[in-house]
Amino acid sequence: MQFCNYLIYGYAGVNSETFQLKNLDRGLNFDLYHAVTALKRKHPHLRVLLSVGGDRDIPSDLDEPNKYLMLLENIAHRNAFINSAQSYVSTYGFDGLDLAWQFPKNHPKEFHSGIRRAWHKVKGWFKSKKVVDEKAEEHKEQFVTFLRELQQSLSSKGAMLTLTMLPHVSAELFIDIPQVMPYLDFVTLSTFDFLTPFRDPKIADYTASIYPLYERDPAQSADYQIQYWLNNTSQMGKLVMGVPAYGRVWVMDKDSGITGYPPIHAAGAAPAGNLTETPGFLSYPEICVKLHKNRDLKGDAAPVFKVGDPTKRFGTYAYRDADDNGEYGLWISYEEPATAANKASYAHVRDLGGVALFDLTTDDKLGVCGEGKYPILRSIKFKL
């Protein structure tokens, strides 16, 4: 914690009936809330916020209306949330609230290639014609009202209010940037997961590029997203660049070729790792141990081969070709200490407010990669 100024604990959710804040940590009661805020006793400089949403508040019926939008539409719902949020913050000793608000997401863009096996010959990206939210303009205005009301309540008790923009949520559709900035202490931009194995199962590519990739959608880059906000606010010191401490993993098969050079054909999400237990997702230590394996090993035990980025523009990936049976192929776009340091330098040069690591649990907390404990976190800190 000596490397962090803020710790954001996620996630709480919204009760779909009462619209009050609710605990999503089933079976853990509220013990973790007390444990997290107790860290301030050992680290007095640390401020701890409770985050709401974060794509973790998933309804049992995916067809039910979006409660995060319903809350914005009704003053009684907003008041119920605000009162409960104030109670949570004061009861458990949080320094404020972070809204990782679950707005509707942009639909995946269709990828077109002229030659089936030559995925690098890109013809273009096309936006989906599906409407994300027919009432987006109303919800944008209501969100400003909600932030004003919530900030007034929290600030009366000396508590903070921050916003986290989740991946694939359009700031253009939902956020009136000049209007919301006065009510926020800072905004964290999730400048990663531009592609994932679940949104884009048939195409593997860089997931957290700093700059736009050649013949790709420029919006799928950190620089594009950050510049959009900078073009709409002069308060660059309130903008925080999000950096992942993990990788997204696709399956390579016989149609993926043997070069690993992205973008390439993929066959969906790779199997889950032993630690994270999530298909298509590996923590940094889960990835680094695959890099260091004996090259004589075969099958699922075989190593992956790292391809670095001397340009410091796009990121690092690693891959393992499929075997003769079309099995055991992997393609991983991931963050490592060197690429995280590049992003911290980017943020520093542009006078941004800082860098947020998503998250501490997927960094190498035990030092198994041979770079010390929390190497990604430390690489960020030393560049700021």
Image (cartoon, rainbow, N blue to C red):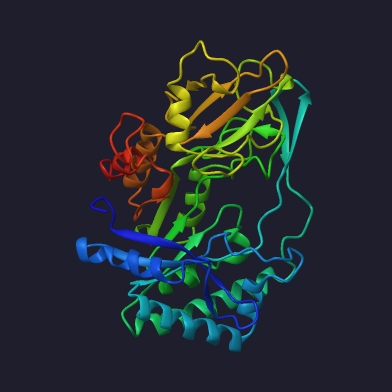
Where 120 falls versus 187 (above or below)? above
Name the quadrant containing residue 249. top right
Is residue 20 found left or right of 185 in the rendered image?
right
Where 351 falls versus 282 (above or below)? below
For image coordinates 53% across by 66% down, the residue present is: 26
For image coordinates 55% across by 81% down, the residue present is: 20
Residue that extends furthest to the bottom in the rendered view of this protein = 76
Front residue of 155/233: it is 155
Q: Quadrant of the N terminus?
A: bottom left
Is residue 204 found left or right of 164 in the rendered image?
right
For image coordinates 51% across by 44% down, the residue present is: 276
For image coordinates 65% across by 40% down, the residue present is: 197
- Residue 242 in the image: state x and y as whole percent: 44, 50
Is residue 240 found left or right of 276 in the rendered image?
left
Residue 44 is at least partly visible in this image: no
Where 51 falls versus 285 (above or below)? below
Name the quadrant containing residue 262. top right
- Badge count: 0
- Residue 232 in the image: state x and y as whole percent: 49, 60
Residue that extends furthest to the front in the rendered view of this protein = 27
- Residue 120 in the image: state x and y as whole percent: 67, 24
Name the quadrant containing residue 252. top right
Where 241 falls versus 330 (above or below)? below
Front residue of 178/47: it is 47
